[in-house]
Image: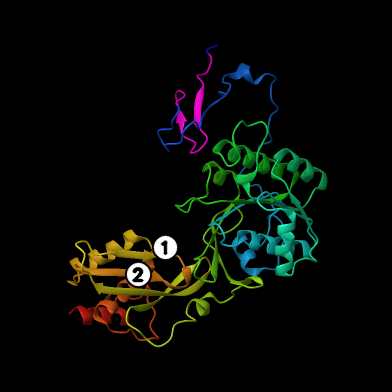
């Protein structure tokens, strides 16, 4: 039988090469390419004959998975109703955004509900985690705490303790002694995630993994980790705002577009049951360039303020600055206003912001953005009782106002 050709993988970006090289052509890292053992192929390579797996039809009725509620309504909403046993959850977010604070509060809430919980920290010492717990008022929570990065020791501890929930903070700090790569590399993250997810499915333990993010906002490491886990959550927010948003981008046990809103306070993260009132709390009297967008986030409506500023530019190419919205959508809206409505924006700097650190991806926000831009350009304040959405009828008051301003 012909032997499979060896493959070489970059431990920094995961790119596959046909031969070894000192520099990776994909990411530019030096001395990051290592040889990986080829997978065996052919029926003879499997050795002994395997067992037949049980098969069922699609009409087989299955009971819904049991869930454990934490008591944090915003977290339970994002999880789809609570924590599912034997599930693997990946939580990502910017450094210092509050991931460890959120998970420590969540772990304490689950522990107070009767679940046996373990919190394994690979980034901080146990004394640092205890100091945070004292500041948050969680010292009395029955949470078992550990500080370790060796995955073999962690799995041995989990196997002997048999908890209901295990939090690993973070997956980039874990290392497996069978993989010859540095902690945080693509090979180590992939192998560590595979071992933890396999353990969760085999032992019925819910595992929450904390993941770092890159400067592009994606979870660092191979994308295969997001495919391994059952749920992927992103913890979003701006450093200058106290609001934090927990967003589900993948959930095998619930909706994948649900959000939970929190407010960062001196005593930790506080839940926000009415996000609309929080995002519009700083909205005073009507001012030009401000429009309220009525959108749907998951299963509940959310009112968000769109803020626009249009000013003359002395630059050859006017600036287009966007926060909380895709910059390509702003260019499209400006092109529509110029081509279809006859409103020029040439020679004008345009600044657009979604208040409260919210990120809007719903196409229905285009009308609110257009109204805010037109209001800022004409220096005319919109009525404070109006809100905008592309789902409004074609003869609604907002459309009549735009038509009146554009002639």
Q: Which residue is mark 1?
A: 361
Q: Residue furthest bottom?
A: 285
Q: Where is residue 88? Give x, y as percent.
A: 65, 49
Report the residue at 62% width, 37% height from top. 191
Circle 2 Cα neighbour tier, 10 Å, few/some/many (<14 / 14–19 / ≥20): many
Q: CA distance from mark 2 to mark 1?
A: 14 Å
Q: Where is residue 397? Give x, y as percent.
A: 31, 82
Q: Is residue 110 magenta?
A: no
Q: Residue furthest right?
A: 160
> Is residue 213 left or right of 137 when viewed as pictured?
left
> Is residue 113 left or right of 272 when viewed as pictured?
right
Q: Which residues are magenta?
A: 3-21
Report the residue at 51% width, 61% height from top. 257
**Coloration of the structure image:** rainbow
Q: Where is residue 20? Give x, y as percent.
A: 47, 24
Q: Which mark is residue 352?
A: 2
Q: Looking at the image, is mark 2 or mark 1 earlier in the sequence?
A: 2
Q: Where is residue 254? Give x, y as percent.
A: 59, 58
Q: Quadrant of the N terminus?
A: top right
Report the residue at 59% width, 33% height from top. 181
Q: Is residue 16 magenta?
A: yes
Q: Quadrant of the C terminus?
A: bottom left
Observer-nearest of 172 and 393: 172
> Is residue 225 left or right of 133 when viewed as pictured?
left
Observer-nearest of 399 and 144: 144
Circle 1 Cα neighbour tier, 10 Å, few/some/many (<14 / 14–19 / ≥20): some
């Amino acid at each position: 039988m012909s032997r499979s050709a060896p493959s070489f993988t970059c431990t920094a970006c995961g790119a596959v090469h046909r031969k070894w090289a000192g520099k990776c052509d994909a990411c530019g890292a030096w001395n990051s390419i290592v040889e990986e053992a080829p997978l065996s192929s052919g029926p003879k390579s499997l050795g002994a004959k395997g067992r037949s797996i049980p098969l069922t039809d699609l009409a087989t009725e299955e009971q819904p998975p049991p869930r454990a509620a934490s008591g944090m309504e915003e977290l339970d909403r994002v999880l789809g109703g609570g924590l599912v046993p034997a599930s693997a959850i990946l939580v990502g977010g910017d450094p210092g955004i509050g991931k460890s604070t959120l998970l420590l509060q969540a772990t304490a809430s689950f522990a107070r509900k009767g679940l046996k919980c373990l919190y394994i920290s690979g980034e901080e010492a146990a004394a640092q985690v205890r100091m945070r717990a004292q500041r948050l008022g969680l010292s009395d929570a029955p949470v078992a705490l550990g500080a370790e990065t060796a995955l073999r020791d962690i799995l041995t501890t989990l196997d002997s303790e048999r908890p209901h929930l295990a939090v690993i903070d973070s997956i980039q700090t874990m290392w497996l002694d069978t993989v010859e790569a540095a902690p945080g590399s693509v090979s180590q993250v992939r192998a560590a995630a595979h071992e933890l997810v396999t353990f969760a499915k085999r032992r019925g333990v819910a595992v929450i993994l904390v993941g770092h993010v890159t400067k592009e906002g994606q979870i660092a490491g191979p994308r295969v980790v997001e495919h391994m886990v059952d749920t992927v959550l992103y913890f979003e927010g701006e450093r200058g705002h106290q609001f934090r948003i927990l967003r589900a981008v993948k959930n095998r046990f619930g909706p994948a577009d649900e959000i939970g809103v929190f407010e960062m306070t001196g005593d930790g993260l506080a839940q926000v049951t009415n996000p609309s009132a929080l995002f519009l709390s700083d909205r005073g009297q009507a001012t030009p360039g401000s429009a309220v967008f009525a959108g749907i986030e998951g299963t509940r409506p959310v009112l968000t303020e769109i803020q626009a500023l249009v000013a003359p530019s002395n630059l050859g190419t006017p600036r287009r600055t966007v926060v909380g919205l895709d910059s390509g959508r702003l260019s499209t809206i400006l092109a529509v206003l110029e081509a279809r409505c006859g409103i020029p924006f040439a020679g004008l700097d345009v600044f657009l912001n979604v208040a409260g650190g919210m990120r809007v991806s719903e196409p229905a926000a285009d009308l609110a953005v257009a109204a805010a831009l037109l209001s800022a350009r004409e220096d005319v304040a919109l009525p404070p009782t109006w809100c905008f959405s592309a789902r409004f009828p074609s003869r609604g008051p907002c459309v009549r106002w735009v038509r009146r301003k554009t002639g």
